[in-house]
Image (cartoon, rainbow, N blue to C red):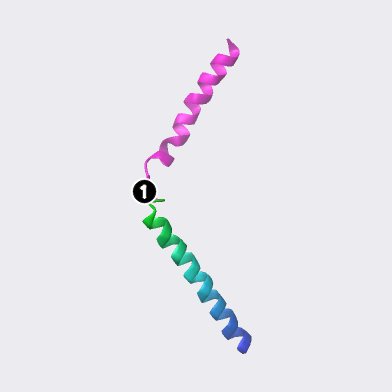
Amino acid sequence: MSALFILIGISLIVALGFLCAFIWAMKKDQFEDTYTPSVRMLFEDEISEKNQAKKNN
């Protein structure tokens, strides 16, 4: 039974660590850019096509 209390305590410490990391990331604006990741894959194709055209010439 005491092992259960130790595991619950450890899980609470880990959860608080993740919560602190999330709050830190929010304060540092890590999640600010929501537009670029959704269109990044569209721009990579254009770059690779231009590189392929240069290699073929």
Residue 7 lies, in percent from the top left, at 59, 79
In the picture, residue 42 is in which quadrant? top left
Please give the range of residues in magenta: 31-57
Residue 48 lies, in percent from the top left, at 53, 25
Residue 1 vertical placement versus 38 (above, below): below
**Residue 14 shown in magenta:** no
Q: Residue at x 54, y 15 (%)?
A: 53
Main SS category, magenta section: helix
**Residue 32 shown in magenta:** yes
Residue 50 vertical placement versus 7 (above, below): above
Q: In what quadrant of the picture does the C terminus appear?
A: top right
Residue type at mark 1: give it. Answer: Glu
Q: In what quadrant of the picture does the N terminus appear?
A: bottom right
**Direction from residue 25 to residue 8 in the image, left or right:** right
Q: Residue at x 52, y 74 (%)?
A: 13
Residue 34 vertical placement versus 7 (above, below): above
Residue at the outermost bottom position: 1
Residue 10 vertical placement versus 30 (above, below): below
**Direction from residue 6 to residue 28 in the image, left or right:** left
In the picture, residue 51 is in which quadrant? top right
Q: Which residue is mark 1?
A: 32
Residue 45 lies, in percent from the top left, at 50, 28
